[in-house]
Amino acid sequence: MKMLGYICIFIIILYLAHITSKYLAKKNEFINKNKSIKIKERLLVNKDKELVLIVYKNREYLIGISQDKFIKIDTFENKDDISEEI
């Protein structure tokens, strides 16, 4: 009987964690919806180095980020996502 109680408490905790994560995801989406700078992709190259593709005002910027600096590598015109899928 005691074991059944522990299982029920565990299931309730999992359910509450699920509801909390959904709430935080919706809140984060609402906050980031109206921002003009968006991170399109992020690629971890090394433990402390990564490449980030940022979209800002119909342009895409490829940026290299390390522990102590960041460098703009290249700039691209932002294409329609539909044409990329074809």
Image (cartoon, rainbow, N blue to C red):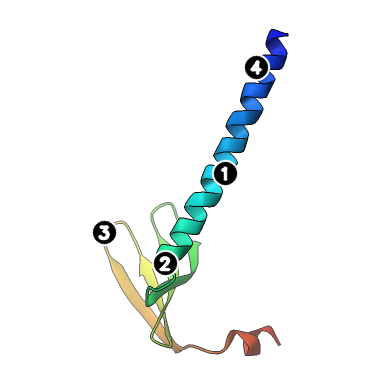
Q: Is residue 56 left or right of residue 6?
A: left
- Residue type at mark 4 is Tyr
- Cα distance in 3D space between marks 2 and 3: 26 Å
Query: What secondary structure is marked by label 3?
Result: loop
Q: Which of marks 2 and 3 is nearer the N terminus?
A: 2
- Cα distance in 3D space between marks 1 and 4: 20 Å
Q: Is residue 38 above or below residue 45?
A: below
Q: Earlier in the sequence, mark 3 or mark 4?
A: 4
Q: Earlier in the sequence, mark 1 or mark 4?
A: 4
Q: In which quarter of the image is residue 38?
A: bottom left
Read off the residue under disc 4. 6
Percent of width and height locating residue 8: 67, 23
- Dividing the image into 4 quarters, which one contains the N terminus? top right
Nearest to the eye among marks 2 and 3: give it.
Answer: 2
Read off the residue under disc 3. 68
Image mark for residue 32:
2
Nearest to the eye among marks 1 and 2: give it.
Answer: 1
